[in-house]
Image (cartoon, rainbow, N blue to C red):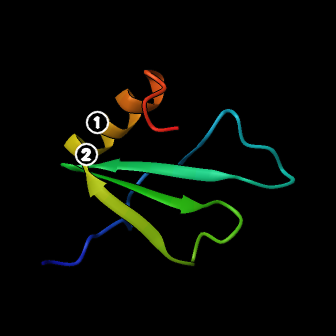
Amino acid sequence: MPALDLSTARWRKSSRSTDIANCVEVAVTAGTVAVRDSKHPAGGLLAVSSRAWTAFATALRADKLF
């Protein structure tokens, strides 16, 4: 699998994040969505396909994950 280049990615912080805790940022690239902890941007990240992210977000909205 080729390395994911996020050098020009535009990271967006969740509107529900606070400066205290539980902050995430999301970057959308061609076919991939990356998620990272905004307090530790140089740390690890989760990258999934745009299709998987859409399914995840749809399930959250429908309250089917919890």
User: Which residue is outermost to the right?
Assistant: 20
The secondary element bearing badge 1 is classed as helix
> Residue 7 in the image: x percent, y percent?
38, 68
> Residue 61 in the image: x percent, y percent?
46, 23
The secondary element bearing badge 2 is classed as helix
Q: From this view, report whether residue 35 is shown above or below residue 52.
A: below
Q: Residue at 61% across / 52% down in the picture?
A: 24
As measured in the structure, the alpha-carbon distance from the residue carrying label 1 to the one carrying label 2 is 5 Å
> Residue 64 in the image: x percent, y percent?
43, 30
What's the amino acid at mark 2?
Ala
Q: Residue at 12% across / 78% down in the picture?
A: 1
**Image marks 1 and 2: residues in contact by CB distance under 8 Å:** yes
Residue 11 seen in this snapshot: no
Depth check: give the residue in front, 49 or 4: 49
Q: Residue at 36% across / 27% down in the picture?
A: 58
Depth check: give the residue in front, 13 or 46: 46
The answer to which quarter of the image holds residue 17 is: top right
- Which residue matches tag 2? 52
Q: Which mark is residue 14?
A: none
Within 10 angstroms of label 1, few (less than 14), some, or many (20 or more) residues? Answer: few
Q: From this view, report whether residue 55 is shown above or below residue 58.
A: below
Position of residue 25 in the picture relative to residue 3 (left or right):
right
> Residue 29 in the image: x percent, y percent?
28, 50
The answer to which quarter of the image holds residue 37 is: bottom right
- Which residue matches tag 1? 55
What's the amino acid at mark 1?
Ala
Position of residue 30 in the picture relative to residue 39 (left or right):
left
User: Which residue is outermost to the top?
Assistant: 62
Within 10 angstroms of label 2, few (less than 14), some, or many (20 or more) residues? Answer: few
Depth check: give the residue in front, 32 or 9: 32
Q: Residue at 38% across / 60% down in the picture?
A: 8
Position of residue 12 in the picture relative to residue 5 (left or right):
right
